[in-house]
Amino acid sequence: MPVVAVIGAQWGDEGKGRMVDMLSEKADFVVRFSGGDNAGHRVVNPHGEFRLRLTPSGIFYPRVVSVIGNGVVVNPAVLNQEVDGLNARGIDTSRLRISDRAHLIMPYHIVLEGLEEKALGSKAIGTTLKGIGPAFADKTARYGIRVGDLLDKAVFRARLVTVLEMKNKIIAGVYSQPPLSLDEIYRQYCAYADRWAPFICDTTALLAGAIEKDQNILLEGAQGVLLDPDFGTYPFGTSSSPTAAGACQGAGIAPARLSKVVGVFKAYQTRVGAGPMPTELNDEIAATLRERGKEYGTVSGRPRSCGWFDAVAARLSVRVNGFTSVAVTRLDILDTLPQLKICTGYKLAGKTVNDFPASVAVLAKCRPVYEEMPGWQKPTGDIRLFKDLPVNARKYVKRLEELIGCPASHISVGQRREQTIVRKPIF
Ligand code: IMP
């Protein structure tokens, strides 16, 4: 049963796209299962450098079927742009499939999110403003419009009439903004329907057939566990579950079919958007991590908060996902640092905290307890075997493994596919 989920184990931007791009070599199907175009999966491969927002990172391999699963919210305008961009660079996208159950991001989602974030002022979540939260809220509230609705224009129009009337009442009545035009949205989405109809299908049936044939399926996470609506730094998080359980739900695959769950951890910590990050640094080490790691939001371009690896947060991630192994990415970014720190616990009002708190108010008061380790101050980008890493780099990885209680099957030492130390293959 080779169904493998690749999960972002921190606050997103851990290098999932890069890992999936590499692992896709042996995959038959690669499935996005959550989020939407808030994701920005940066992939560097022989075709060049890409920033994928909706398209699964398996798209570069001719044998791979790339699936946008039911758990994703799809902005068809972004999909058009992304697929056109890939085609212009010679990438064949004919094997893309889109779940008929996935929800659509509509123009009013984006308008309303902008208005809501503005209204929150200094309390804003710092979202990517792509309409993700409002689209998932509508899905749960049962006001959503699904990709499959595009296949019958009368059904789509009737649904749009009902929902838009309600949304325009909020846009005009609450925010005093001009209402959106039904005809304009209808025309625009009919054009998307014409383009995407051949790609829309019941992807759960497609994947069930693949499981039956024992084909390799990779479930590609977006965002990270610390942005999960249940386990993350609520409300400073995203609106769908980037977890292993979310992978099953968002791909339509039964949990018992999952054979491996790989958690992707950066060798240090970053986050973008509002909300506390206990190990955040505001010194020259943060500047070094940001510049060496190019730590700027892929979608928004915002500088990311940077700091030391947080094993308290990591343990929560391991606990709720049951990782069978982890991938430690960007070890090379630490190559120049003389001294490293790992956060092993928090201090709160004189007491030690070992479990990541549910409340952001509590988390904001937690102070990290650090363990120090000497750096290795040698380049690691050309190393392909664990035993060839500098001794202090090996010690650092081993200490992370001990602290989180999970073995590292992969270690990345650069952005290119081949810059990966594979200790245990996935397929
Ligand atoms: P939203 O997902 O656009 O609603 O944004 C909610 C929060 O999740 C914000 O803090 C975003 O910065 C963060 N976020 C969303 N997608 C990503 C991602 O792909 N990487 C990192 N952070 C993300």
Image: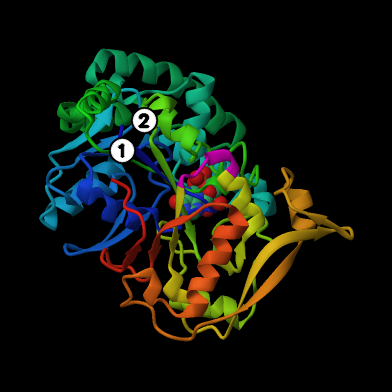
Image quadrant of residue 306? bottom right
Q: Residue at horizontal 24%, vertical 47%? A: 58
Give the CA distance from mark 2 to mark 1. 7 Å
Local SS, label 2: helix
Judged left or right of residue 53, residue 141 is right
The image shows residue 53 at horizontal and vertical percentages of: 34, 49
Q: Residue furthest front?
A: 387
Q: Is residue 239 above or below residue 14?
A: above
Can residue 409 be seen by looking at this rendering?
yes
Crowding near pointer 1: few (<14 within 10 Å), some, many (20+)? many
Q: Which residue position holds label 1?
A: 31
Task: Find out whether residue 322 is within the magenta segment.
Answer: yes
Q: In this figure, which residue is indicated by the disc labeled 2?
A: 251
Q: Nearer the viewer, residue 298 or 174?
A: 298
Q: Position of residue 395 (x, y in %)?
A: 54, 72
Camera-side residue: 285 or 105?
A: 285
Left or right: residue 258 versus residue 65 is: right
Viewer-proximal residue, 387 or 66? 387
Residue at 22% from the left image edge and 23% from the top image edge: 209
Q: Which residues are magenta?
A: 319-324
User: Residue 393: x, y in percent?
Assistant: 49, 75
Q: What type is the residue that disc 2 sits on?
A: Ala
Q: Given the image, on which type of amino acid does mark 1 rest?
A: Val
